Image (tube, rainbow, N blue to C red):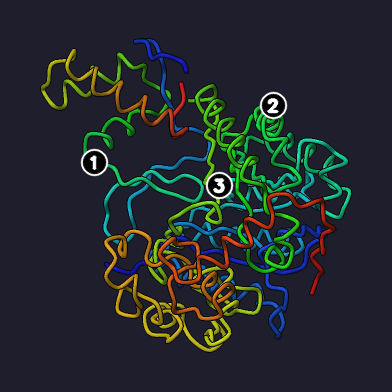
Amino acid sequence: MKYRPYLLLAELTYRCPLHCPYCSNPTRYPDGRELTTAEWQRVFREAAELGVLHAGLSGGEPLQRADLPELVAAAHEAGLYTNLITSAAGLNQTRFGQLKSAGLDNIQISFQSDEELAANRIAGAAMHRVKLTAARLARAEGFPLTVNVVLHRDNIDRLAEIIVLAEELEAERLELANVQYYGWAFRNRAALLPTRGQIAAAAVIVAQQTKRLLGQMRILFVTPDYYSDRPKPCMDGWGSRYLTVNPAGEVLPCPTAKEIKELRFDNVREHGLGWIWHESAAFNRFRGTEWMPLPCRECEFREVDFGGCRCQAALLAGDASVTDPACSLSPYRDRLTAFVESAQNRQTLDFEFRQNP
Amino acid sequence: MNVMTDESRPVLTRGVRLRADPLTGEPLLLYPEGFLPLDAAAHGILLRCSGDLTLAGIVLALSEEYEAEPDVLRADVVECLTHLRQEMLVVW
């Protein structure tokens, strides 16, 4: 099977009590009411039939959905591995009990920093202590824990302390995710982009701490593509291994695909997930290598990075069907380089905080 | 990292699941946001990482099943489990 979805990202709601300026949620939310419990239950069953192995329950903040335990149970009963991707807002003892009974496999909690004041400032909400309490409860309840920290100019200098925090929380996994510049993060990219020196220092710390914590905590860190010569192999290829269903039921090849204005995304209220995956125009638009322009079409890396990210091409070059401008071979790389250089000596800028739908 | 001894008792890390691929039947190790397809040898080892057996016990069981020399087998089992420990897929 050349194209098989392995992971379904279920964006249950775009509501969230946090206002992180690096959120990759869309800045214009889709019309239409959120999918019902029954509609999600059908989505999880259809996903499992398509070959999906993993359900990431995300948002917004998925705990804003009162029916979250039912949705976890539906995904679990369909045979999917379930991961709750949460800010921890609303994650109390009662909720833990319900989620455990529902068969939840893993909890991923986001942190904004190791320092309370800085963390609360970035989140636009006083949430740091709530997160610490929830992470400790997760351990006490026997859940495996992933700590996720989005790194940017304002917190990347705290990396060593952030790693110690994850270690103290006894996380199995620590995701150090450099900001990806889509949605709200794209709006805030001048305030968020770290300097070249910050990235280099972070890479040294990650290498040292990965070695120290080998076999105790798995650390995941990827160099941001704004500082790379090669584009990221986005989604392992468009419509190849991943799918996202947003709160309104639209099915996307990646969570940020709505950045591509020329595409229309089909909805699970109108079509089965299998038809959308195999037959819909949006999923077939950038599959394989046929769609590729030069220099991708003749590039030896075309089956390695798949031309990079379509959303980034749309955002930076104004055309989703060109080579990702993060690639040094892109005719638009100069624009990205100019932006990166302009960020090297910049003073602190104010954030535009994420708003709710 | 903890070095394996004969008394080590390897188990799947919390949240790691051993499953058959529902479409192909091949054995998979599932972990948050990823999976690892397993060959027959790794599958055989992981089936015995239930916490009931020590490394010595796993090697003995496998040597009987495959009619192989325990010493040779032990090195392969330790190599496999050490790699999986680095990925935080097993612990002991």
In this view, A20 is above or below A259: above
- If you read the primary sequence from the N terminus, does the residue marked by circle 3 or circle 2 appear first? 3
| C-alpha gap between disc 3 and disc 2 | 21 Å
Front-most of A203 and A26?
Answer: A203
Residue A161 left/right relative to A1: right
Q: Residue at x 71, y 58 (%)?
A: A22
Q: Could you say which disc has been placed on residue A105 in the image?
A: 3
Q: Which residue is mark 2?
A: A168
Q: Chain of mark 2?
A: A
Q: Which residue is mark 1?
A: B39
Percent position of residue B6, x then y: 34, 10
What kind of element bears circle 3? loop
Mark nearest the camera among 1 and 3 is 1
Residue B4 left/right relative to A319: left
Q: Amino acid at mark 3?
A: Asp
Percent position of residue A286, x then y: 40, 77
Q: Chain of mark 1?
A: B
| C-alpha gap between disc 1 and disc 2 | 35 Å
Residues at circles 1 and 2 in contact by the CB criterion of under 8 Å: no
Q: Residue at x 68, y 72 (%)?
A: A26
Q: Residue furthest left?
A: B67
- Image quadrant holding the C terminus of chain A, namely bottom right
Front-most of A58 and A209?
Answer: A209
Few, some or many residues within 10 Å of mark 2 (<14, 14–19, 20+): few
What kind of element bears circle 2? helix
